[in-house]
Image (tube, rainbow, N blue to C red):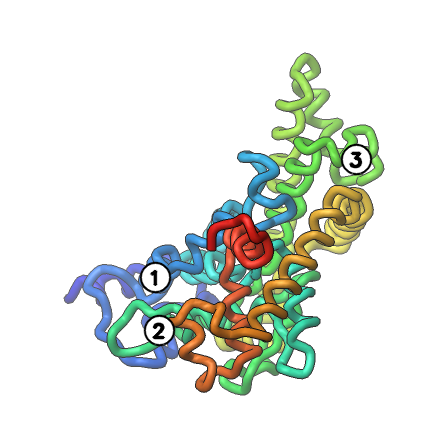
Amino acid sequence: MTGSDNITELEAKRLAPYAVKSKFSRGRRYPEPEHPFRTAFQRDRDRIIHCNAFRRLEYKTQVFVYHEGDHYRTRLTHTIEVAQISRTIARALGLNEDLSEAIALAHDLGHPPFGHTGERVLNKLMAGCGGFEHNSQSLKIVEELETRYPSFRGLNLTWEVREGIIKHNSSHDRPIMSGEYEKDKAPSLEAQIVDIADEIAYNNHDIDDGLSSEMLVPEALMAAELWNESFGEVKKSFPEEDFKILKYQTILRIINRQVTDLVDVTRSAIEGAGVASAEDARERGKSLAHFSPEMKRKNSELKDFLGRNLYKHYRVLRMANKAERILEGLFKVYLKEPKLLPPHFSSEIERVGKERLICDYIAGMTDRFALDEYKKLFDPYEKV
């Protein structure tokens, strides 16, 4: 028995019947020999971690732009938290942890600078030219834009990871996909749990960052039932601790409650639907991974609170307004004079199209690069 055979055999014994087994992957667009001791999904994870787009997430906005503080989440630290929560849920449900982790690590690769403001601005600027949606951009990165291999463009990831990327679905994401990814079928259960892990991660770390920035007031948070209940439990257990410790312990408790609820409800949904295989789960056409009605209500209340009190805070809106002017300025100046683009980009105009090429270039920028580029193009005293 070869090393790869041993790994896939162990995987088959360990995973639930409805988990995706790497041995039965639909494979890569460009055939490659299997690795002797890593599964296909492990290799996908590693390729994602080592790609340029993943490293750039370090300087892309989650809520706060990188220069506002060293301890706020970036798009990279958010991604790591999503991957960690996804692995926990996958293990509890007997799903393929490597597949969930790979999807989680790739789910935000296509995010432009300045968070959802950047996505909205690029979509507006690309009206009439196909628009912009970050799931599609994430897929484009792993299928085309990363250039690391001599025989093909992109990372040549497995079909299951690519499907999970394009079908990522949340309150901020609405998948747009081609026929290759069977739009009428649900993604794998491994992909479904990443969708919820994403929401768990950003709600809770945005509370943490919001309180640290003092944009959120602790007393006001008591209006959110999930926070109020969890904070009360923590305060009762540690009455003498200062608020900083109580804050961290409350967030940990909320995450644990949400993950536990999700695991219990999803397991019941799988059993109730009689799901017996990975393909059976996909044939259901809708996600089986979800919260209980009570947790869904409390989570929605928390999201609404953050929407009113953090995402629409005047300091966040000011930066969003600044970001919009920066991205519009960059797009328009490149559109007027494409030769201002780096030569390795401008040489691709005929193949890709001017607008889409500019969009890809800007989408790949970090916040820091976009700010520096704006200064170089518009400040006469800045070195170019």
The type of residue carrying mark 2 is Asn
Please give the residue where the numbered disc 1 appears in the rendered image.
47
Give SS at disc 2. loop
Where residue 167 sits in the image (x, y, percent)?
A: 57, 71
Q: Which mark is residue 156?
A: 2
Total numbered labels placed on residues in the image: 3
> How many angstroms separate mark 2 from mark 3 (CA)?
45 Å
Q: In this view of the protein, which residue sits in the foreground, 113 or 7?
A: 113
Please give the residue where the numbered disc 3 appears in the rendered image.
221
Q: Is residue 159 above or below residue 98?
A: below
- Residues at circles 2 and 3 in contact by the CB criterion of under 8 Å: no
Crowding at label 2, few (<14), some or many (≥20) Cα neighbours within 10 Å?
many
The nearer-to-camera label among 1 and 3 is 1
The type of residue carrying mark 3 is Leu
Q: Is residue 288 above or below residue 219?
A: below
> How many angstroms separate mark 1 from mark 2 (CA)?
9 Å
* Residue at x 59% of width, y 64% of height: 330
Quadrant where the image shows the N terminus? bottom left
Which of the 4 image quarters holds residue 40?
bottom left
- Residues at circles 1 and 2 in contact by the CB criterion of under 8 Å: yes
Nearest to N terminus: mark 1 or mark 2: 1
Where residue 240 sits in the image (x, y, percent)?
A: 68, 12
